[in-house]
Amino acid sequence: MAVDVMKRIRDHVLASSTVVSYVGSRVYAGEQLPVGYKPADGPAILFNVRGGGMAYHNLTEDPSIQYRIYGETLNDIWDTYNALKDYLTDAHGVYVASGRIETMGQQLVEPETDRWIYILCGFRHHVRDI
């Protein structure tokens, strides 16, 4: 049985009261934000698996996760990124045992969405299903 990495990561992020204070429930798995989302709605986190490995017994995965943090203002975006970064590097949960930063946050522009600004970063996690 494979680990449901997307569910485990989303649940892990939503376990942080600090992160939730910025994004509420706007933590989305996949390649695109939900239809209708606008930065004026408040900060949001979009994440997706971009690769990784798996333990031989198929109960633990080591995914590389790409995170994008959106918001209406640069302060909102950077504050949300810093809260996420601090949480992911320090938090050790039951299903997500660790987080190691692979790519520090970099500010980019989303050309397809009226030039929304976002921060892109990457983490490697140790995810298990027990």
Image (spheres, grey):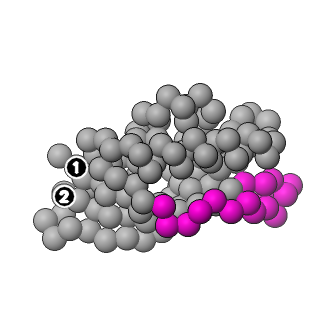
Residue 83 vs residue 96, the one in the foreground: 83
Give me the residue at 86% from left, 55% from top. Answer: 114
The verdict on residue 127 being magenta is no
Q: How far separated are the C-alphas under marks 1 and 2?
A: 6 Å
Numbered mark located on residue 59 in the image: 2
The residue range painted magenta reads 101-118
Q: Position of residue 50 (x, y in %)?
A: 48, 68
Is residue 24 left or right of 53 when viewed as pictured?
A: right
Residue 97 visible to the viewer: yes
Q: Amino acid at mark 1?
A: Asp
- Disc 1 marks which residue? 129
* Residue extending furthest toward the left: 57
Q: Amino acid at mark 2?
A: Leu
Query: In the rendered view, would you say 15 is above or below 113?
Result: above
In the rendered image, the quadrant that contains the N terminus is bottom left
Q: Main secondary structure of the magenta part?
A: strand
Q: Position of residue 11 (x, y in %)?
A: 40, 39
Query: In the rendered view, would you say 104 is above or below 35?
Result: below
Rendered image quadrant of residue 99? bottom left
Q: Position of residue 38 (x, y in %)?
A: 76, 41
Rendered image quadrant of residue 61? bottom left
Q: Are marks 1 and 2 in contact (CB under 8 Å)?
A: yes
Numbered mark located on residue 107 in the image: none
Give me the residue at 80% from left, 53% from top. Answer: 116
Rendered image quadrant of residue 53? bottom left
Element class at badge 2: loop
Q: Earlier in the sequence, mark 1 or mark 2?
A: 2
